[in-house]
Image (spheres, rainbow, N blue to C red):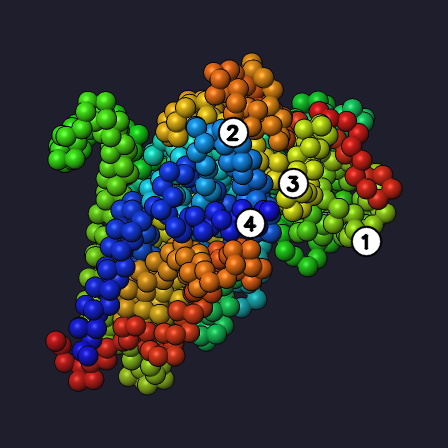
């Protein structure tokens, strides 16, 4: 079904003016580049929400949303800006779902979305720096800023009586931002970070980094990296040299492939991951599985929510006008109103059509703060018997 | 076909392609591509000066472009007073000590005779300096980075107009190139390539890790612009009036309500186009100035000497030319041009993201521009910048369209068609390879090959 949808959207995109009565929404993600393995599922999740809306036939008197994909490349701000420019000025999209990586997201917001007055909802840009964007209220994100995860992780460690950790982070805006916020929060709750050292991804050997980390002396090692990149290398080198056997992991490190790679030595590791074990999250996972989307793929739920919010705001505004969509984003996402779960978009559209108010909960319990960012909930995980167990939700 | 006709024709085709995008997609897209074409051309000119004139194989373009970006931050961002208060004093002491160290090393090299004593004293000076600077520098860095790490944590810049950073970027890159050149230009071509490759990575590593200077991988966004902001234009009465006047014929027949909403949309579109035109004017000025200077240089006795050195170092050396000094000169000039382009690019992006500098985009792609355009020919490098950037951006939409059309006879659910559709975005890299291969096969010298004036007579 997902593929059929995809084919039809792409076809529609090329057919262009012939289907002019459709409402176009841009989906700009890094289809090529460093996160190209994640983006197809993210885009498919967003398009799943659009399909749900289209099938209901309730949007603005039966109009259809048509997704127009564009490539953000994840790293090349210039190419991403050009792609977004095309979406906004040539395809005339009503809003944008994206972008993904924090760097290109900032560039698109500053150079295209805000100047043209187009709402942009990023499902995965987590850099704390984006909170300061002069976005005139047009930039939203459905994934929480890393600053929040640092605080949660510090709380988790404190509650377990851990007072000293060494930390290592992947050297990019994600890793560094998270490490900074964690260090600050951990100090605030009385903990001590013995050393904070960067690691670069893609190296064959991490024993030098691990040597420095272990020399600082602490039992726990916090790894803020990627599970199929340097983060895994750090853990392997730590175990090989016996430097550390107790790990603290952030969201980029959570995944079954890490357990497969490391084995039972990972037992006892603790970590945090955005998203709750809520019934909403589970029902989204079930929907996604039916549509052929990989289970628990990073940022798929956030992508679905981002797309759903755009559609609902459109309905609340009563038009696909860019500025009007912006004016209704907060209203549909936040309380008060009837709670809308994933898979219930038709219900939400109907309520809005009848002039009611909704509070979109979605797959990730969306609630925007005053600058259009979610606080998000985090799962506290622990590896037990070779799998990640959810201890509780923060 | 004479080279002049060929050049005119190639640029006409290129202009046609951009106009096609303007008509079929939108003028905003066409101008956005045009602006980046201009910047790419400047960067390609820089590489062409090094490779085309002098045969220097510099694969460290990325590093010099990044230095330009650093200059944009250091010049244009307002200074952060709190950070200066926190770490300024210690930092100033470290800077002073560093200068003293450099001075003493230079003095030692000058006054002491070559030999073990000199080597030993230089080593002692460096060790003493390291020990002396550390207690000042590290606390300074820690203090600066502790100031609001989520949105500051660095010193900020000088708060000067960002246009100035284009010059500073050039100077910064030139300075780095001078140091690099002094060390590595004695190397033979392939060794120089490896050295520049490594040095570019070092520059990126420094920019990524010295947070007190440029926030490192946490990115600096919101750089000031040399041109007006769209949102300000949209509020300005004179701009709205101008748009109204410009579109009088389309607006006049509309009803009052339609007219207001239509005008609002037009103002948004025009503000975006107006800003891009301003950028285009600035970039075009830089490109034309650098191009004219390069063409003059290439056709001067200096240019002939450079080509002589490139084609036969031994012979040129026998004629009394100082090969290493000339190489250093051309290496510095070329790198400066790349630095200017790097600063222009960061200005246009409005942000510095050190994590996004990767060799594929900032070294390899620039080389493809020079080689496809025609190395040794300045116009060729400019054309290469246009052609390659155009395909780099347009390969994606055109690729999707091509695949769709060529598989339209298949069933919409056909697995082959779906697979091709899903990987359409990857057409970008394929297209680059294809363009490079085709040009190399049918036009080994590039689209506009170097025109060699055998008689040496001035035209």
What residue sits right under mark 3 in the picture? A288
Callout 2–callout 1 Cβ contact below 8 Å: no
Q: Chain of mark 3?
A: A
Task: Check disc 4: other Cα within 10 Å, few if <14, some if 14-19, many if 20+.
Answer: few
Q: Chain of mark 1?
A: A
Residues at discs 2 and 1 both on one chain: yes
Q: Earlier in the sequence, mark 2 or mark 4?
A: 4
In the rendered image, residue A12, in percent from the top left (x then y), is placed at 43, 48
Q: Is residue B326 positioned above or below A250 on the image? A: below
Label 4: which secondary element: helix
What residue sits right under mark 2 in the picture? A309
Task: Check disc 2: other Cα within 10 Å, few if <14, some if 14-19, many if 20+.
Answer: many
Label 2: which secondary element: helix
- Residue depicted at 39% across the width and 74% down the height: B438
Callout 4–callout 3 Cβ contact below 8 Å: no
In the rendered image, residue B4, in percent from the top left (x then y), is placed at 17, 73
- Residue depicted at 68% across the width and 59% down the height: A204
Callout 3–callout 1 Cβ contact below 8 Å: no
Q: Is residue A63 positioned above or below A229 on the image? A: above
Q: Earlier in the sequence, mark 3 or mark 1?
A: 1
Quarter of the figure that contains the N terminus of chain B: bottom left
Q: Earlier in the sequence, mark 2 or mark 1?
A: 1
Q: CA distance from mark 2 to mark 4?
A: 23 Å
What residue sits right under mark 1 in the picture? A240
């Amino acid at each position: 079904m997902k593929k059929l949808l995809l084919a039809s959207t792409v076809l529609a995109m090329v057919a262009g003016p012939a289907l002019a009565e459709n409402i176009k929404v841009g989906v700009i993600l890094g289809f090529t580049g460093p996160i190209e393995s994640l983006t197809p599922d993210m885009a498919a999740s967003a398009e799943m929400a659009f399909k749900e809306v289209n099938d209901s036939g309730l949007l603005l008197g039966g109009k259809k949303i048509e997704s127009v994909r564009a490539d953000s490349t994840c790293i090349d701000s210039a190419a991403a800006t050009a792609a977004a420019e095309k979406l906004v000025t040539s395809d005339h999209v009503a809003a944008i779902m994206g972008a993904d990586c924090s760097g290109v997201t900032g560039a698109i917001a500053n150079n295209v979305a805000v100047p043209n007055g187009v709402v942009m909802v990023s499902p995965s840009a987590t850099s704390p720096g984006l909170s300061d964007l002069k976005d005139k209220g047009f930039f939203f994100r459905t994934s929480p800023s890393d600053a929040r995860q640092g605080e949660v992780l510090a709380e988790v460690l404190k509650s377990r009586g851990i007072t000293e950790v060494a930390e290592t982070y992947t050297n990019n805006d994600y890793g560094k931002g998270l490490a900074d916020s964690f260090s600050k929060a951990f100090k605030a709750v009385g903990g001590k970070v013995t050393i904070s050292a960067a690691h670069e991804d893609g190296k064959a050997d991490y024993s030098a980094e691990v040597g420095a980390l272990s020399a600082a002396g602490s039992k726990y090692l916090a790894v803020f990296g990627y599970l199929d990149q340097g983060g895994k290398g750090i853990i392997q080198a730590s175990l090989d040299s016996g430097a550390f056997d107790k790990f603290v992991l952030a969201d980029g490190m959570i995944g079954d492939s890490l357990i497969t790679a490391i084995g039972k030595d990972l037992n006892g590791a603790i970590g945090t991951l955005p998203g709750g074990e809520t019934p909403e999250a589970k029902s989204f996972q079930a929907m996604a599985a039916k549509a052929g989307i990989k289970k628990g793929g990073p940022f798929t739920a956030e992508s679905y929510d981002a797309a759903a919010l755009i559609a609902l705001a459109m309905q609340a505004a009563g038009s696909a006008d860019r500025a009007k969509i912006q004016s209704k984003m907060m209203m549909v996402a936040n309380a008060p109103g009837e709670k809308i779960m994933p898979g219930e978009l038709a219900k939400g559209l109907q309520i809005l059509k009848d002039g009611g108010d909704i509070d979109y909960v979605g797959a990730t319990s969306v609630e925007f703060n005053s600058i259009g960012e979610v606080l998000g909930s985090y799962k506290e995980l622990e590896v037990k018997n070779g799998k990640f167990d959810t201890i509780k939700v923060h | 076909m004479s080279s002049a006709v060929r050049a005119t024709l190639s640029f006409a085709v290129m202009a046609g392609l951009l106009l096609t995008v303007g008509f079929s997609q939108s003028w905003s897209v066409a101008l956005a591509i045009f602006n980046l074409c201009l910047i790419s051309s400047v960067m390609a000119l820089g590489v062409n000066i090094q490779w085309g004139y002098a045969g220097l194989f510099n694969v460290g373009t990325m590093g010099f472009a990044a230095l330009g970006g650093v200059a944009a931050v250091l010049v244009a961002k307002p200074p952060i007073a709190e950070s200066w208060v926190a770490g300024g004093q210690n930092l100033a002491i470290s800077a002073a000590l560093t200068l003293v160290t450099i001075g003493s090393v230079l003095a030692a090299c000058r006054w002491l005779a070559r030999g073990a004593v000199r080597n030993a004293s230089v080593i002692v000076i460096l060790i003493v300096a390291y020990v002396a600077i550390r207690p000042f520098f590290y606390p300074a860095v820690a203090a600066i980075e502790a100031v609001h790490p989520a949105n500051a944590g660095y010193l900020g810049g000088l708060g000067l107009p960002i246009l100035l950073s284009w010059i500073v970027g050039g100077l910064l890159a030139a300075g780095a190139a001078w140091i690099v050149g002094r060390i590595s230009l004695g190397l033979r071509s392939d060794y120089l390539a490896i050295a520049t490759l490594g040095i570019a990575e070092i520059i990126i590593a420094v920019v990524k890790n010295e947070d007190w200077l440029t926030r490192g991988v946490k990115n600096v966004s919101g750089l000031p612009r040399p041109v007006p902001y769209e949102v300000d234009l949209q509020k300005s009465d004179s701009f709205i009036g101008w748009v109204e006047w410009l579109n009088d014929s389309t607006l006049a027949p509309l009803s009052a309500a339609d007219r207001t909403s239509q005008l609002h949309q037009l103002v948004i579109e025009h503000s975006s186009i107006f800003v891009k035109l301003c950028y285009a004017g600035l970039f075009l000025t830089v490109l034309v100035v650098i191009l004219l200077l390069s063409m003059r240089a290439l056709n001067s006795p200096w240019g002939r000497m450079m080509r002589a050195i490139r084609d036969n170092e031994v012979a040129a050396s026998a004629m009394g030319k100082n090969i290493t000094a000339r190489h250093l000169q051309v290496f510095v000039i070329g790198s400066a041009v790349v630095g200017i382009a790097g600063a222009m690019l960061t200005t246009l992006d409005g942000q510095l993201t050190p994590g996004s500098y990767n060799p594929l985009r900032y070294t390899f792609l620039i080389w493809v521009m020079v080689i496809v355009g025609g190395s040794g020919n300045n116009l060729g490098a400019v054309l290469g910048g246009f052609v390659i950037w155009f395909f780099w951006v347009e390969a994606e939409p055109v690729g999707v369209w091509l695949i769709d059309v060529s598989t339209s006879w298949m069933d919409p659910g056909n697995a082959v068609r779906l697979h091709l559709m899903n990987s359409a975005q990857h057409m970008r890299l394929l297209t680059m390879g294809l363009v490079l291969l085709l040009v190399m096969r049918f036009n080994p010298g590039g689209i506009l090959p170097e025109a060699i004036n055998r008689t040496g007579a001035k035209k």
